[in-house]
Image (cartoon, grey):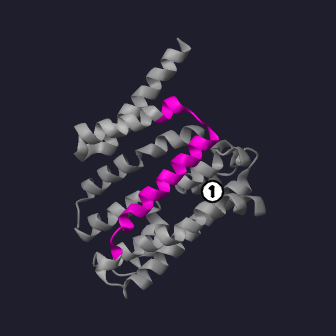
Amino acid sequence: MRRVLALVAPLGLAFIPLGMALGFLVVHAGLSWWWAPVFAGVIYAGSLEFLMVALVAGAAPVATVAVTSLVVNSRHIFYALSFPLHRVTGLPAKLYSTYTLSDEAYAVAVSPEAQGWTTRPILFMQLTFHLLWVTGAGLGGLVGEALPIDRLVGLDFALTALFIVLGIEAYRQRPDRLTAAIAVACAVGACLVVPGQMLVCAFAAFTAMLLLRRRTRHA
């Protein structure tokens, strides 16, 4: 468990301020503070939760919520290809591990230090992330009621900053300049060509390029 915490701590500690940012946004969107830990515990999808605040506050149609969730969380399809779910035994454990598959949990689970982990350390890692996220969101919801709205400037970049750190760490573990260059090119190209649908188009282009690269390599 100590080895698990040693890997979880750097990312897990970031969950508190990030969760608090979510709590602040929930309160200042006009929702009750307790919606923050509910979002964090039930939805538990990071960036989707920030989007969900605006959708819920604006009473968005269910279809809009469903499509947004599918688009934003489509990256989890690729996570599932290499996440070590086969090392988690028991149906309840597999269901919880699947439910709490986050970007941070994936980054830790596929790291070289976690190659020998089985059910208990994997679930302990995911449960720790889950609890820290809920705790941060709850604190943010409570504290956010006492903060003025102008204090929230810049908080929407907090999650983006975490993804940048995850990307840097992933590159350090498996340096691949070509893949990194393809990812940057797809992101910049999508931002310039279709800024309104940048994320979806960048993901689609990146996936197509990776498939083409794989086919070329094995040709």
Residue shown at 24% from the left, 44% from the top: 195
Please state the total of marks drawn on the protein image: 1
Q: Is residue 20 above or below residue 82?
A: below
Q: Main secondary structure of the magenta part?
A: helix
The question of residue 203 being in magenta is answered with: no
Residue 38: x %, y % from top left? 44, 72
Query: In this picture, which residue range is highlighted in magenta?
Result: 152-180
Q: Position of residue 5 (x, y in %)?
A: 70, 63
Q: Position of residue 24 (x, y in %)?
A: 38, 76
Q: Is residue 29 above or below residue 105?
A: below
Q: Nearer the viewer, residue 136 or 66?
A: 136
**Residue 159 lies within the magenta run:** yes
Instruction: Tell me if 39 is positioned left or right of 8 in this view.
Output: left
Q: Residue furthest bottom?
A: 146
**Residue at 53%, 43% in the rendered image:** 79
Which of 60 and 159 lies nearest the eye of the viewer?
Answer: 159
Q: Quadrant of the N terminus?
A: bottom right
**Residue at 48% over, 53% down:** 163
